Image (cartoon, grey):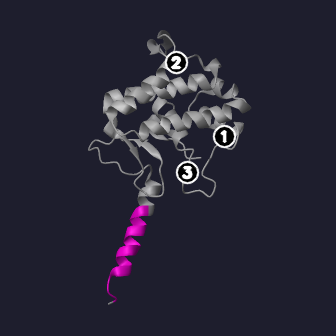
Amino acid sequence: MPLTRGPDRGTGVGVAVDLVNTWDELMDEPDLIEGVRDVRYWIDWHGLHEAAKRIEEPDVDRARKLRSRFERVFDARSEAEAAALLNELAREYATAPQLERSGRGWRLRSWPDEREGLDAVAAYGTAGLLEALRDLGWRRFGRCAGSPCRCAFVDRSKNRSRRYCSTLCADRIAQANYRARKKTRPAS
């Protein structure tokens, strides 16, 4: 299961993107969520250890449905549609904002406590995507250009040029393009 590394690991955006990317068109069996273990692993990877412990068998199908709803955000036809989809998720999963300790300071939390399991993870992912939409804009929500891959990403590049979900896909396409060019060149 491909999981976020770097600055988005452990963030709401990372949680949401990694869930969307548990459907991988490059695999013989594209659904990478096979059971409870996979859902727990994805959640635990992002540091939501208490939520991961709470996952049970019915949560597997709920995680797949949540993945579908997050996918719709990345596939929206407009910023307004993406915002409406995220607002719908926020109404369903969010809780009243609360202040909680974060290191020496405070942070505002608008998602359920981790003891709520998948509901807390859904709200956390939704909040992350809402913040990304507000801070970066909808045009930064992308799908990999390395067909048949359809993995999602949020473009944080300075020049807004990201086209691929990972260096693996970028390299795969670059190699395919190189081989195609080499094949069409006349032999010398």
Left/right of residue 78 with respect to residue 6 in the rendered view:
left
Identify the residue position indicated by label 1 in the image. Answer: 38
Determine the residue positioned at 60% across, 37% down. 64
Determine the residue positioned at 41% across, 74% down. 179
Provide the secondary structure element on which disc 1 rests.
helix
Task: Determine the CA span between mark 3 and mark 2.
Answer: 28 Å
Left/right of residue 108 with respect to residue 21 in the rendered view:
left
Left/right of residue 121 with respect to residue 105 in the rendered view:
right
Q: Which residues are magenta?
A: 173-187
- The relative height of residue 2 versus residue 123 in the rendered view (above or below) is below
Residue 93 image offset from top left, x and y in percent = 53, 20
Identify the residue position indicated by label 2 in the image. Answer: 111
Residue 180 inside the magenta-drawn segment: yes
Under mark 2, the amino acid is Trp
Determine the residue positioned at 59% across, 56% down. 27
Provide the secondary structure element on which disc 2 rests.
loop
Label disc, if present, on residue 118 of the rendered structure: none
The answer to whether residue 156 is visible is: no
Under mark 1, the amino acid is Asp
Left/right of residue 163 with respect to residue 13 in the rendered view:
left
Number of on-image labels:
3
Upstream in sequence: badge 2 or badge 1: 1
Determine the residue positioned at 46% across, 38% down. 72
Upstream in sequence: badge 3 or badge 1: 3
Under mark 3, the amino acid is Asp
Identify the residue position indicated by label 3 in the image. Answer: 24
Q: Residue furthest bottom?
A: 188
Residue 187 image offset from top left, x and y in percent = 34, 89
Upstream in sequence: badge 3 or badge 2: 3
Task: Determine the CA span between mark 3 and mark 1.
Answer: 14 Å
Task: Determine the CA span between mark 2 and mark 1.
Answer: 22 Å
Residue 124 inside the magenta-drawn segment: no
